[in-house]
């Protein structure tokens, strides 16, 4: 493998279409005969669905059909879990449409098909839904009390408790000279994408082929679910990935609409398109992050951590969705972060409420648990009179301990270990870049009416989920190469980074890579998509395997033509030659194709440290980020430009979670933040002072690239670092934030409560 | 209703329902799908187009209100041969990822730089704060806009 493009800040291929308005997102498609779907959603959080009268809707000119659960023989299909599909979760999985009960505001009740979205929306107004309201469960207390059961008498409101354990926590706590117990909470928010979800389905009755556009993230898996639900063989379904306006974990999972829209197309025999509006998006896309912790730490007097134990709780909303358990699992399993904690006993209880179901959001569970841990660490360091940097340094896992086994999760999964790293390196680099010693002088000072605070935190970021990824290379008639990937694009720039990897692996210029096609089920035999920061590691490694097979196939074909041994064939950029000097143009071998794969069940662990400087205005509660430095070691950098984009982009999302983003419900289960006027997102003027440093110090030993997943590092540490910075700024007042977001009213209230 | 206006320098005549937004008309009637719709309530800025040179939320304007006006979309700020200096700057600074907010960023930045080619970073941030990007964290977008200022300056100073 050459190293001409990997590591270079190559400008993106994708940009040429996006910048000129030539991207093709699902709502840009308009096949002939198209009908538009609009979904009637429950306005009641919890209730018995008694009747739906849509006769008046059918009278409206331009309305073609109204679909309800009654149109599905045998009842609406249930959406299975993709990750951690434990039997315990079965009773809580979501039907594609409400049949007899509604369990959250936003749950699909009926689908209207009409000539235009406007007519379909008119029709919604003409549908009468009779729901007998039941008491809404909106808090952990109400869920565990169980007076109102979401799933009837046979299933309680608690779906499951996971337990993360290692060592002997009880014994460690018994002999510990120092302990501290604390409670923390993170708020419900989510991976809002700028492009709302959307799907377009076409049923080709003559050929028996169903084509679904707008599919994203995990297309092969979703095809498996849909094939079963709709009663078609998998190869009769084409899932097509269009340009995707952001993923962040939330987009591309199998949602109710992923059945309803293909079903509608087949039902009516015409193409059907559904485009989510923003209000729907806020109540229908996976929510995330609502977690509470009651945890206790045990330490020696010198600050060595002896143990961590306690209980955490995650609000799952109304159903267990495809990846709903991931964040909960991570809250427990990764509470120890990059630190050596020999004795752990932390459980996480997944409880159901009448709110939108949850799924993953970038850094799932890790953002929450890093906030809990890093907040606790600052309190402990203060108690013990140890410098907060020294406290962390003392407890970071050492390079000599790699691979380092972390707490095991029960039931179901999973042993896991850190692959490689020297966690002190990123901490040191972060302190130096940030100017920690100099800025420490400002700690807690009141200057011009604002308190200054600085803080730091260390983190790890899991990547490279298995089990497999596929890649295929094909030689075109002009001698150029087309790359086909099982990985999918969610905006992260995979076309560019895969072109870089392919060009180096094939030892050809990048412009000989004609296209990188990805995601869609037609491209490769099997694909696993884009989640858990896996694309570069899994897809990139599969691409190396495909390249080796491709080059070998070219050698064999050329050897036949040149009458020599395959091993003697020399591959050039545009020609191949034999030992006698005779040569062929690559174009003459057009049609050669080779598929490769990478199988791996181990995870990569990017690691790093963040440091920040904030000011807090005690009169308004407003926090300003004066400086923020994020340092991480990703093992190997494919494209420093796109990597920096991942770090800064995810960091700003994390700051949104730390300060702004909050999905608020009232006690009736009504979503109060149903627009972008209410659900606040960071804008260009909020966080101008962010810096990132990415290193490639310790390559991952578990893949041929040495790369580690790197899409989530910016977001994971942000909540904890910001809360500690605010605590340190307001240290003289004794303020200790225990809850996010640190919105101006909350910070103002903390200041005033302390006075 | 029938309404006539110019889009990207060419006259168009469309017959639309009075309630149709300019965004929907551009996208679904005129098939100019570069203009994106992200919220339909005027917050996200993805649908920003230029109307008589001013940056406007096309989701908050009805198609019939465009009657007699000059509408410019991202397609009108692009050409086939090459990226424009503003687009090149976005590419150079990696000021886009998923591309969904990008047309609104380009139209907004174009309107700003046309009026104020000497604007500073704070002004760029202020103006772009009406356009939400979920991928980049904005820093690269601000850098891209600042770096494109020279292309909008007239020789001898002032706006081109």
Image (spheres, coloured by chain):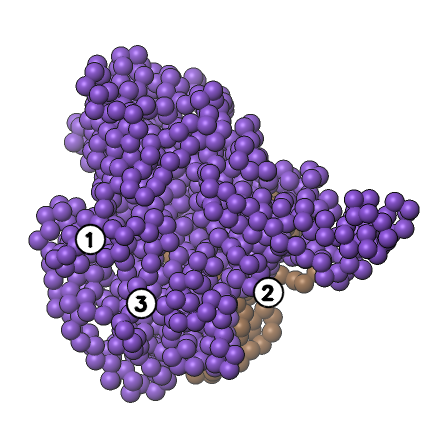
Chain colours: A purple, B brown
Give the quarter of the image for residue A133: bottom left
Residue at 55% in and 59% down? A525
Circle 3: is it few (<14), some (14-19), or many (20+) Cα within 10 Å?
A: many
Q: Residue A566 location, x and y as percent?
A: 79, 48
Which numbered disc, 1 or 3, marks the residue that appears first in the sequence? 3
Residue identifier under label 2: B76
Mark 1 vs mark 3: give the one in front: 3
Q: Disc 3: which chain?
A: A
**Between marks 1 and 2, how big is the CA–CA gap?**
49 Å
Task: Check the image and report above or below for A463 versus A198.
Answer: above
Q: Residue B86 location, x and y as percent?
A: 61, 52
Residue identifier under label 1: A353
Tell me, yes or no, whether dots 1 and 2 are on the same chain. no
Foreground: A421 or A169? A169
Q: Is residue A137 visible?
A: yes
Task: Check the image and report above or below for A753 versus A22.
Answer: above
Residue at 69% in and 51% down? A550
Instruction: Check residue A750 in the rendering and tell me which mark sits there, or answer none.
Output: none
Residue identifier under label 3: A77
Horizontal side of A171 relative to B130 (left or right) equals left
Q: Secondary structure at mark 3?
A: loop
Give the quarter of the image for residue A703: top right
Q: Is residue A190 visible?
A: no
Q: Secondary structure at mark 2?
A: helix
Mark 1 vs mark 2: give the one in front: 1
Circle 2: is it few (<14), some (14-19), or many (20+) Cα within 10 Å?
A: some
**Between marks 3 and 2, how big is the CA–CA gap?**
46 Å
Q: Quadrant location of the N terminus of chain B?
A: bottom left
């Amino acid at each position: 493998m050459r190293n001409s493009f990997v590591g270079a800040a190559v400008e993106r291929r994708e940009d040429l279409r996006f910048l000129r308005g030539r991207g093709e997102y699902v709502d840009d498609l308009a096949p002939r005969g198209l009908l538009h779907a609009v979904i009637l959603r429950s306005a009641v959080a919890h209730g018995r669905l008694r009747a739906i009268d849509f006769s008046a809707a059918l009278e409206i000119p331009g309305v073609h059909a109204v679909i309800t659960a009654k149109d599905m023989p045998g009842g609406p299909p249930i959406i299975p879990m993709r990750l951690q599909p434990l039997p315990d979760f079965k009773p809580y999985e979501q039907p594609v449409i409400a049949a007899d009960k509604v369990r959250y505001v936003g749950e699909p009740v009926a689908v209207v098909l009409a000539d235009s979205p406007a007519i379909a929306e008119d029709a919604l107004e003409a549908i009468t839904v009779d729901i007998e309201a039941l008491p809404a469960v909106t808090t952990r207390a109400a869920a565990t009390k169980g007076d109102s059961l979401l799933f009837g008498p046979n299933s309680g409101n608690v779906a499951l408790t996971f337990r993360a354990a290692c060592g002997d926590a009880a014994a460690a706590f018994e002999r510990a000279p120092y302990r501290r117990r604390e409670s923390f909470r993170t708020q419900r928010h989510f991976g809002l994408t700028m492009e709302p979800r959307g799907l377009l389905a076409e049923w080709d009755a003559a050929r028996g082929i169903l084509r679904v556009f707008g599919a994203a993230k995990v297309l092969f898996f979703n095809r498996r679910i849909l094939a079963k639900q709709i009663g078609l063989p998998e190869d009769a379904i084409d899932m097509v990935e269009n340009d995707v306006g952001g993923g962040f974990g939330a987009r591309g999972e199998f949602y109710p609409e992923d059945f309803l829209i293909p079903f509608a197309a087949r039902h009516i025999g015409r193409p059907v398109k559904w485009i989510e509006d923003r209000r729907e998006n806020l109540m229908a896309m996976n929510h995330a992050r609502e977690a509470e912790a009651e945890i206790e730490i045990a330490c020696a007097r010198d600050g060595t951590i002896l143990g961590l134990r306690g209980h955490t709780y995650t609000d799952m909303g109304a159903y267990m969705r495809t990846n709903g358990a991931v964040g909960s699992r991570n809250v427990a399993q990764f509470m120890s972060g990059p630190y050596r904690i020999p004795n752990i006993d932390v459980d996480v209880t997944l409880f159901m409420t009448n709110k939108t179901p949850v799924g993953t959001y970038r850094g799932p569970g890790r953002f929450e648990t890093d906030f809990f841990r890093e907040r606790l660490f600052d309190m402990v360091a203060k108690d013990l009179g140890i410098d907060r940097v020294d406290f962390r340094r003392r407890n970071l896992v050492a390079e000599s301990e790699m691979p380092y086994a972390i707490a095991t999760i029960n039931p179901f999964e999973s042993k896991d270990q850190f692959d490689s790293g020297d966690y002190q390196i990123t901490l040191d680099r972060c302190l130096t870049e940030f100017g920690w010693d100099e800025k420490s002088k400002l700690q807690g000072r009141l200057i011009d009416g604002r308190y200054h605070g600085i803080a730091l935190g260390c983190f790890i970021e899991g990547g490279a989920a298995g089990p497999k990824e596929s890649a295929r290379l094909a030689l075109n008639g002009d001698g150029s190469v087309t790359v086909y990937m099982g990985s999918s694009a969610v905006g992260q720039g995979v076309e560019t980074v895969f072109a870089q990897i392919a060009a180096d692996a094939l030892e050809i210029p990048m412009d000989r890579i004609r296209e990188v096609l990805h995601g869609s089920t037609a491209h490769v035999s099997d694909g696993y998509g884009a989640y858990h920061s896996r694309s570069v590691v899994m897809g990139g490694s599969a691409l190396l395997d495909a390249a080796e097979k491709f080059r070998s196939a070219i050698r064999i074909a050329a050897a036949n033509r040149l009458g020599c041994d395959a091993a003697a064939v020399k591959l050039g950029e545009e020609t191949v030659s034999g030992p006698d000097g005779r040569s062929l143009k690559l174009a003459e071998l057009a049609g050669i194709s080779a598929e490769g794969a990478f199988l791996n069940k181990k995870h990569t662990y990017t690691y790093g440290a963040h440091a920040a400087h904030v000011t807090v205005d005690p009169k308004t509660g407003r926090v300003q980020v004066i400086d923020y430095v994020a340092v991480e070691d990703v093992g190997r950098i494919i494209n420093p430009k796109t990597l920096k984009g991942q770090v800064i982009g995810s960091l700003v999302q994390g700051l949104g979670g730390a300060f702004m983003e909050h999905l608020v419900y009232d006690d009736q289960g009504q979503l109060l933040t149903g627009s972008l006027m209410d659900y606040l997102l960071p804008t260009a003027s909020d966080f101008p002072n962010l810096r990132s440093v990415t290193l490639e110090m310790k390559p991952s030993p578990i893949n041929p690239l040495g790369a580690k997943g790197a899409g989530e590092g910016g977001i994971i540490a942000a909540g904890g670092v910001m809360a500690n910075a605010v605590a340190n700024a307001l240290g003289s007042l004794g303020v200790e934030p225990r809850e996010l977001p640190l919105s101006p009213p909350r910070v103002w209230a903390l200041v005033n409560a302390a006075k | 209703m029938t309404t006539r206006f110019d889009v990207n320098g060419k006259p168009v005549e469309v017959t639309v329902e009075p309630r149709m937004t300019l965004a929907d008309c551009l996208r679904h009637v005129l098939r100019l799908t570069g203009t994106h719709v992200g919220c339909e309530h005027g917050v996200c800025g993805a649908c920003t187009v230029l109307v008589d040179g001013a940056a406007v939320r096309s989701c908050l304007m009805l198609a019939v209100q465009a009657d007699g006006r000059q509408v410019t979309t991202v397609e009108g700020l692009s050409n086939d041969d090459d990226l424009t200096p503003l687009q090149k700057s976005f590419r150079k600074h990696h000021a886009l990822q998923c591309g969904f907010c990008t047309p609104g960023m380009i139209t907004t930045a174009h309107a700003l730089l046309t009026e104020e080619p000497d604007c500073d970073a704070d002004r760029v941030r202020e103006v772009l704060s009406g356009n939400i990007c979920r991928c980049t964290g904005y820093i690269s977008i601000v850098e891209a806009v600042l770096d494109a200022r020279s292309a909008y300056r007239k020789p001898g100073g002032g706006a081109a």
